Image (cartoon, rainbow, N blue to C red):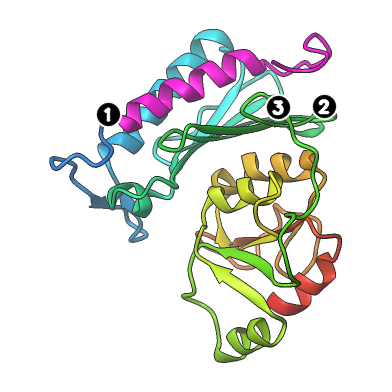
Amino acid sequence: MRENPHMSTAPVDQALEWIHEAGEVTQAHFRSSELHVGSKSDGSPVTVADRDAEHLLRERIAEAFPADGIIGEEHDDREGSSGRQWIIDPIDGTRAFSHGVATYSNLLALTDDDGPLLGIINLPALGETVWAVRGEGCWFNGERVSGGPPALPGEQRVLCVSGFHDWSPEMFAAAHDANVALRTWGDAYGYALVATSRAHAMFDPQLEWWDLAAPLLVIQESGAMITRRDGGEDLAARSHDGPYALSAIASNDGDHSFWVDLLA
């Protein structure tokens, strides 16, 4: 499945097995007429599928690596002593999930003292998994990703976004003038599209670390570029206090400054 499978210190095969299990948990609730969608304190949606999938991943990690720390969107952090930390977003794109839209994903990342080590974007309703290991590249359903922009006719570039809630009229005008096609293929799906050369760029103005940890390494190991909205390379730097204070722009067309100027 992977080149040089004994080279990595990341438990790739275990993590892939776990994330696919989590995907099956979410698929059991997907498009169910009995699915109840609640709201968290920050107003974002949550379902039993979010909580059950994260619980499963936490159980698998704790059993295999009891000294590792765990943080996730739906449950309390678990401190570790190994210097490694797992980051879980059981359903990235809960609004898509709760509306029966297949672009939602399960995210799992592993960091160590040197930063992100493993990142997985699993898209169970689409049958797609994109993952990366630090220093070893990026894979899409078992095939190594070659990187680069999409081979599309014409000069129009495709920008994915999770929404337009903070877009100004000037931003829309600038995108139109630059011949940029805007598509709401957002959440982690947008980063998967950039990493696999199916879109040119992805923009997220508001993120938490569990939204970003897995896509960050996937983008970097695919050969694409990722920065904060302002072009800064410290993706963990918060722009303000409170929730969703991170931001990201990813691009694969070799002109990242164009996207920063357009979106900053």
Residue linked to disc 3 = 143
Q: Which amino acid does label 2 sit on?
A: Glu
- Element at label 1: loop
Does the image show residue 204? no
**Is residue 215 at all visible to an observer of this figure?**
yes
Q: How crowded is mark 1: few (under 14 residues within 10 Å), some or many (20 or more)?
A: few
Queried whether the magenta region covers residue 2, the answer comes back as yes
Between 29 and 126, the one lying in front of the other is 126
Q: Is residue 119 above or below residue 250?
A: above
The residue mark sitting in front, 1 or 3, is 3
Per the rendering, the mark at residue 28 is: 1
Rounded to the nearest angstrom, the CA distance separating label 2 from label 3 is 13 Å
Say whether residue 245 is left or right of residue 227.
left
SS for tag 3? strand
Residue 4 point in image, percent of width and height: 83, 13
Task: Give whichever of discs 1 and 3 has the lower sequence position.
Answer: 1
Of residues 61 and 4, the one nearer the viewer is: 4
Q: Residue flagged by tag 3: what amino acid is it?
A: Glu
Q: How many marks?
A: 3
Which numbered disc flags the more N-terminal residue, 2 or 1?
1
Give the amino acid type for the residue marked by disc 1 in the picture: Ala
Segment tinted magenta in the rendering: 1-27
* Mark toward the viewer: 2 or 3: 3
Would you identify the image quadrant in which residue 145 lies? top right
Task: Find out whether residue 186 is within the magenta segment.
Answer: no
| Mark drawn on residue 136 | 2
Identify the secondary structure beneath mark 2.
loop
Q: Badge 2: how crowded within 10 Å, few (<14), some, or many (20+)?
A: some
